[in-house]
Amino acid sequence: MKPHHYFPVALALSLAIGAAPSTQAGDDHERARQAVAAGEVLPLSSVLAEVERQYPGQVMEVELERDDGIWVYEIKVLRPSGALLKLKVDGRSGSVLGSKSKKQGGH
């Protein structure tokens, strides 16, 4: 089953296919799109392929942010065990900078 990617749709489209960003957060989306186009940031598809290979599960959310001048993908993955894994991935290299895992509570 193909994982679902839940994150700002306009950002996803901007990064994936170069679509125009939404007006709500247009400046941020445009900067992110330009960073990908300029080669400053790996395309989302490349980052997700590596994350899905190393950390099997369902990608629940992705954000691309600037953190101290560095582009960082923040990715949440729901693992088969039920744990929610939060990854910080260097946007330029694709290397995992850090991770946190949290077991989801049952009902």
Image (cartoon, rainbow, N blue to C red):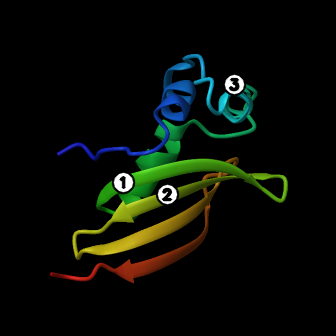
Q: Residues within 10 Å of mark 3 (few under 14, many from 20)?
A: some
The tag earlier along the polypeptide, 1 or 3, is 3
Assign a secondary structure to mark 2.
strand
Horizontal arrangement in the rendering, residue 7 relative to residue 106 (left or right): right
Mark 1 → mark 2, Cα distance in angstroms: 7 Å
Q: Which residue is mark 2?
A: 75
Quadrant where the image shows the C terminus: bottom left
Q: Position of residue 48 (x, y in %)?
A: 45, 47
- The residue shown at (62%, 30%) is 24
Mark 1 → mark 3, Cα distance in angstroms: 24 Å
Horizontal arrangement in the rendering, residue 98 relative to residue 16 (left or right): right
Contact between marks 3 and 2 (CB within 8 A): the answer is: no
Give the answer, above or below, for where 100 lies relative to 33: below
Q: Amino acid at mark 2?
A: Ile
Q: Which residue is mark 3?
A: 37
Disc on res. 36: none
Q: Which residue is mark 1?
A: 59
The tag earlier along the polypeptide, 1 or 2, is 1
The tag earlier along the polypeptide, 3 or 2, is 3
Q: Amino acid at mark 3?
A: Ala
